[in-house]
Amino acid sequence: MTSATLSSAEIAGEADVATAPRSTLLIPGFLLAIAATSIVVGIMWDISWHISIGRDTFWTPAHMAIYLGGVLGGSTCGWLALRHTFLTRRKDDAAVNILGVRAPLGAWVTMWGAVAMLTSAPFDDWWHNAYGLDVKIISPPHTLLGLGMLGISLGALLLGLSHQNRVQDWAGDWLFIYIGGIFIALGSVFVMELTTPNLQHGAMFYEVAAVTFVFRLVSLGVAGRITLPATRAALVCLAMGCLMSWILPLFPAQPKLAPIFHPVTHMVPPPFPLLLVFPALAIDLILKKMDGLVQGWRRVRLSVILGAAFVAVFAAVQWPFSSFLLSPAADNWVFAGNRYWGYESNPGEWAHRFWEVSRDLPNYRPFGGRAIVFSWAIAAMGAWIGLLWGGWMRKVQR
């Protein structure tokens, strides 16, 4: 008579299967990725709508795309809170308990963002009715809306992180990269007025870029478990910007409000997106060579190196590329050169010149000397925050 026995390796294998972390966040993560995409597409579309057509009814397709993202994100995470609070009894449930209600951390952040977005809707409508047309991106209702959109994109990122860190499969890796790209794209939208090609030889442009993008790229580079995560996320951002720049002009548009200084016959595209993929690649290569999870003075040293790499590489590629964008060679459908002016603009010779670089202008601030050092300092601080936050994100599992 023989008895069946299990080897220690088989026992260990069964134990691994039994205790392997499971995640039910992949589908909600995809839904939040769709919500974040709808928001970014909607806000870029809405900016184009304002400068192509003008102030219109609140119920424009662009507005509906924005608030669809808020409703989808809030509904998805509301369901997660319901499920984790009442329908799940697993003790190892990956959720955060707040006042007796359980939900993943990313769901809590997303629900807050959805509430802020939906609250901003009547505020924005009242603002326009009270103060008339505004084509500025930054206004009080837009600020509240922007905070809500940031909450949803950040919540989606955290939910994707939870799945990536618990399961570590290819779907979770790519979900995190895609949401990371949307997270970068959303930041680029809100600084669009400060990063047009005409400003890309001035000090302010590089300072704004350092504030906006360095901590995003570094944190994604540290938290991502796939090869070159910051570079891949920057490619997603680049693809999103290119698609919007190429697709919007395919649709006819006509201004409805006076004064009309510039004839517009089609939707005005956004400027060609920034070439963030190159500094992102430099950041990824540095993080691959050096440990991104260092602490203390070693983290400070790494931050200084990453900040210098961002400023040097970004200036090396964006400086000549912006000169190309202002040249007649870029005045075409692909690069949208000289085509991003709305109907209230009156583009002339100044539209083909760099601003902030002539001494006869009141805002004279060229990029050189002290401006380079200041941009480096800002980038280093952003890199330090990115290393800190990216290290924390690698631990997020709920």
Image (spheres, grey):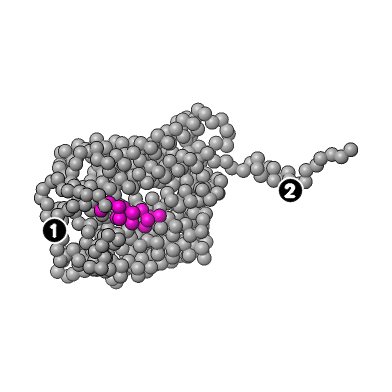
What percent of the width, then of the height, locates residue 242?
A: 33, 56
Q: Which residue is mark 1?
A: 346
Q: Secondary structure at mark 1?
A: loop
Residue 354 falls in image quadrant? bottom left
Residue 9: mark in rendering: 2
What percent of the width, then of the height, locates residue 157?
A: 43, 47
Q: Is residue 79 magenta?
A: no
Residue 363: mark in rendering: none
Tell which of 375 and 309 is nearer to you.
Answer: 309
Q: Answer whether residue 303 is visible to the viewer in this image.
A: no
Residue 98 vs residue 205: left or right? right
Residue 274 falls in image quadrant? bottom left
Which residue type carries mark 2? Answer: Ala
Which residue type carries mark 1? Answer: Asn
Q: Is residue 42 above or below residue 350?
A: above
Residue stretch rendered in magenta on the structure: 236-249
